[in-house]
Amino acid sequence: MQNDKIREKARSIRLLLMDCDGVLTDGKLYFGPSGEAMKAFHVRDGQGIVDWHRAGFISGIISGRRSEGIVEARASELGIRFVVTGSNDKVADLERILSETGIKDEETAFIGDDLGDLGLMRRVGIPVAVADAVKDVRAAAAYVTRAKGGEGAVQEVIYLLLEARKD
């Protein structure tokens, strides 16, 4: 999709959904000595999410991996309204969120990185892939970030969406 088309569609986006591992994180899984999982989140992505909410918009995470409370804690800190971990059907989770909010597919953007995100990406108004997403996800995306997952890609998308509203 050309930049002008993305900007045009971006003006109508009200809901930003994203995967977690590989999007909000670098996709690596860290385990402590007791087997506890750890994840690293980039502060710039957090700032972008806070700015998205301050502008009056909603965000959510739909992740196929269970998080042992890590994702929920970060989401709570940032005011992320919807958090689904251990998702077996991301499209069904999207439909539930859209039903609850009254937001339409075309008013939604989703940021993904791996094959499990493709079904959801095919439904939303602006499907986004992080720079280091798998080939099929990059091919399905209307926009591919310059930043890799966990390195500010979410903030990049948010600022693109917010800037488009200024035009």
Image (spheres, grey):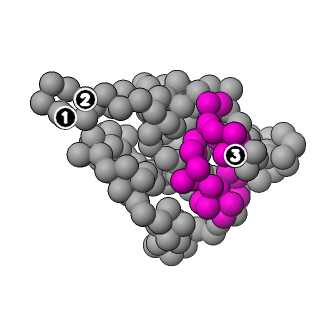
Specify the label residue 136 is tagged with. Answer: 3
Work out whether residue 107 can be spotted.
Answer: no
Q: CA distance from mark 3 to mark 1?
A: 32 Å
Q: Which residues are magenta?
A: 112-138
Quadrant of the image occupied by residue 160:
top right
Crowding at mark 2 (Cα within 10 Å: few <14, some 14-19, many 20+):
few
Q: Are marks 1 and 2 in contact (CB under 8 Å)?
A: yes
Q: Which residue is mark 1?
A: 36
Most distant residue in the left direction: 34
127 and 159: which is toward the camera: 127
Q: Is residue 80 above or below residue 88?
A: above
Name the kind of residue labelled 2 in the image: Phe
- Residue at image coords 29%, 46%: 67
Q: CA distance from mark 3 to mark 2?
A: 29 Å
Q: Are marks 3 and 1 in contact (CB under 8 Å)?
A: no
Crowding at mark 3 (Cα within 10 Å: few <14, some 14-19, many 20+):
few
Q: Is tag 1's residue or tag 2's residue first in the polypeptide sequence?
A: 2
- Residue at image coords 15%, 25%: 33
- Quadrant position of the C terminus in the picture: top right
**Residue 2 is inside the magenta segment:** no
Instruction: Describe the element under mark 2 as helix, strand or loop.
Output: strand
Name the kind of residue labelled 1 in the image: Glu
**Residue 137 is inside the magenta segment:** yes
Where is residue 39? Give x, y as percent.
Answer: 33, 31
- Residue at image coords 32%, 39%: 74
Instruction: Describe the element under mark 3 as helix, strand or loop.
Output: helix
